[in-house]
Amino acid sequence: MTEQVMIYEVKSAASPNAKGLYSNDSKYFYWNETKFKKLNFGDFVFVVNRTDRWVLLSKLDKIDIPTSEREDKTIFRDLGKDFTVNGKWNKFIRLEILNKLSIPNGWMWQSLGSSETTYLNGPRIGLNSSENRLKNISQLMQLSEDETISQILENCRLNFNGSTIKPTPIKPIQKSKETNQDEMNILTAIKTKPFILLAGISGTGKSRLVRTLAYKTCSKEELKKDPKKPGNFELIPVRPNWHDSSELMGYVSRINGEKYIITSFLKFIAKAWKHTNVPFFLCLDEMNLAPVEQYFAEYLSIIETRQVKDGKLITDYIISKESFENQNLYNQLLTNLELSGNEFSEGISIPSNLVVIGTVNMDETTHSFSRKVLDRAMTFEMNNVDLTAGLDFSTNDWSYPESYISNDEVIGKYTSGAEVYSQTFNQKDEVIGFLQKVNNELDGTPFKIAYRVRDEFLIYCFYASKNPTANWLTNALDEMTSMKILSRIEGDETKTGKVLTNLQRIITSDFKKSNAKIKEMESRLQSNGYTSFWS
């Protein structure tokens, strides 16, 4: 590896500047050139911001960006965006962001002190501080299992542990396929809560989207054996006669001896446990052909037990050993699923990398959703149809890309609002203030929101803040209002009329999706005397 590798530590006093130094598309990060003058194009930089709890893997992309001064501020322009920075700086550099990592609670970091920088590879490394550099390398490796990051840091480790092994060249870093804003919103929702409802008229590509996400995240070779179906994807068609959970959870059969009948759902959960660093997508197709509360009862209950413990996201058991009268059947179940008797000795819980997405049609053949289901799910509508789209075979999205959406971009690390509220999240009080205004308008109605919705708003907006775009907070609140507030409103004029009118005091035209949905619901109420979120 010939590239220099540098760590730059953003000090807390400089953190306010860092928030505004992303390009409009969040692909680049800027900083003053002072500490970067010895780098060459293509050299790697780990930017560590402990105040705002993120780390960038980046590479030097541009130097000598000219600036001007206005009073005590520095001004520059690049890629069509004007930047204003506190302080006076001569020139700026541009870093291409290759990966952005979140810093978890409890992460320990060996500070670089007043120097702000250190080198891990290249002619400027200092071997006098090998112990501290090895600590930095180990601490960075804790944040991600990304192959490129691991390869860079493993090569750097050789410089400080006395090894005579030559570093290997870094594999070329290729960009993944572009992720559009709708997909980005869905990925953020999955990180918030891995239970999604995709609603819309038939034929709009709901189940196709789920398979596409599976392709884009299927990074392990052993899961890519089938070109038509990624190994991290399973589609289960829901049948109208499902009135209990046996079709998903399995059951004990006493025909020709006692045995436990295993389902594709259980097999997929077991498979996800064997590849916990890859997101696994379960698509329940036509989810509401049967009553969801009946056939999916166990999951709906257990998904609410998610919690972070010792840095890991865990749940209660969805299948517990003690629920078996004949516990030998449980042991046989583990054997058939090829799960370890030691690791799963008391039960099988939901793996943190399992994403359940149900496709939903609303017509005379389907069941409506209770508030229990809607409260637990993140809801998206897919009713927009572009009849010119999807006709170019070269843009086929059912193929394995050259690079993948990482596990960290899909699977969340937080389950409660308190976990993000205690972090440096400057907009947290704005989120709470918005919800309080909404609740004031919902006061005295059955649609008033409580702690679960509050927590999911905070978590969603926290994740959205890590990839800020123009008006990102308004857009995030707009998405969540549609998903978690409007989706619960249903009834006749007496029940919903004033609610929809009053909400527009808060949900103004700035909230494009939610404001349009309220007007649509009002129109349906006037036409039919009854309204709901569902088209």
Image (cartoon, grey):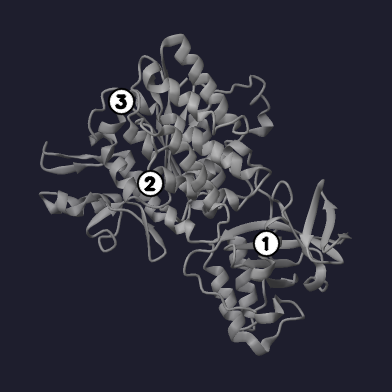
In the rendered image, residue 497, in percent from the top left (x then y), is placed at 43, 20
Q: Which of label 3 and label 2 is nearer to you?
A: 2
Please name the amino acid that badge 2 sits on.
Tyr
Q: Residue at x 49, y 39 (%)?
A: 437
Horizontally, is 254 left or right of 48 in the view? left
Residue found at the very far top of the displayed protein: 527
Horizontally, is 116 left or right of 139 in the view? right
Residue that mark 1 sits on = 16
Please name the amino acid that badge 1 sits on.
Pro
The mark found on residue 290 in the picture is: 3
Residue found at the very far bottom of the displayed protein: 128
Q: Secondary structure at mark 3?
A: loop
Q: Of the residues under marks 2 and 1, which one precedes in the sequence?
A: 1
In the rendered image, residue 350, in percent from the top left (x then y), is placed at 34, 50
Please name the amino acid that badge 3 sits on.
Ala
Q: CA distance from mark 2 to mark 1?
A: 30 Å
Q: Residue at x 66, y 64 (%)?
A: 15
Residue that mark 2 sits on = 451
Residue 204 in sight from this viewpoint: no
Q: Residue at x 29, y 50 (%)?
A: 337
Say above or below: 58 vs 402: below
